[in-house]
Image (cartoon, rainbow, N blue to C red):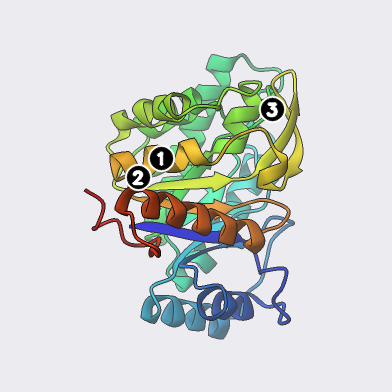
Amino acid sequence: MIRIGQAGIPLSCKGRTNKDGLIYTKEILDLNALEIQFVRGLYVMEEEEALFMNEYASENDVELHVHAPYYINLAGDDEIDLSIEKIMSSAMIADKMGAKTVVIHPGYYGDKTDDQTLKSIIKNTKKLLKILKKEKLKVKIGLETMGKQRVFGSIDEIIEVCKKVNNIVPVIDMGHIHARGDGCLKTQENFAEIFDKLQVLNLDRYLIHLTGVLYQNGNEQYHLPIRKGDMPLAPLIDEIIDKRYEVTLISESPLLEHDAVYIRLQVEKAIMKRTGKDEADYRDLSEIS
């Protein structure tokens, strides 16, 4: 199944709570995924709202994820305790909501070599998972691929951590990969190479972030609407449909739900092209031969 949603409360939603955003995502946008954003700092959600989110999402088949605060550094020696505190705070709320994943930014190289940074992140991620297990939290930790050279998080680095630490999953930010590779994702073959790299992890489902991105010299500058960036969407959709990948596509575009709906329309267009029919449901690939 293909799932599509946006990162945060829809811009067009009058209510500004996460509960409002979830209902709007399902009932107005007809989307089936949502990534809750705790990115600006430690976030407090009342238990009543978290339990509502869990029940509503379960009854209406909406897949939830959570993005932890941006500034986390699992490679830093001085920041590790605060970083784990931020992640655990997010994970506890995510678990109450029934979210699948807590998405985190892994960390910075700083004065360490690439290999030293990798070892630090593996060590501290294992420490984090011990705490999650002790607290009996079922939510998974997702390491996001990053778009700047000074930040740990190339696709190969994220895969390496996931290979070494059980129950850690990759969050594949295609815009970040594209920026870090100085515009490397242009053709279906380029996207196929990313999925080929990920095969070693034997994933049942891929959590993918999508946005346009302005970049220079292998470094992300900022996000753009999908149609304003130079990473084409169609080749990625073709690869997903051709290989029947189970994916969740999250719009991180500045246009949020507008680009999430655009992604949905492009998926349905690709399905109709293959079936010859005048309509399609993005969730259903069963009619494609």
Q: Is residue 44 visible?
A: yes
Name the residue tied to disc 1: 238
Label 3 neighbour load within 10 Å: few <14, some 14-19, many 20+: many
Earlier sequence position, callout 2 versus callout 3: 3
Between residues 4 and 109, which one lies in front from this camera angle? 4
Q: CA distance from mark 2 to mark 3?
A: 29 Å
Q: Residue at x 24, y 58 (%)?
A: 286
The vertical placement of 266 against 110, above or below, is below
Name the kind of residue labelled 2 in the image: Ile
Q: Say the numbered circle drawn on residue 148.
A: 3
Quadrant of residue 185 within the rendered picture: top right
Which secondary structure, mark 3? loop
The picture places residue 10, in percent across and down from the top left corner, at 67, 69
Q: Residue at x 33, y 54 (%)?
A: 276
The picture places residue 146, in percent across and down from the top left corner, at 61, 33
The reply, left or right, for residue 8 in relation to residue 191 is right
Which secondary structure, mark 1? helix
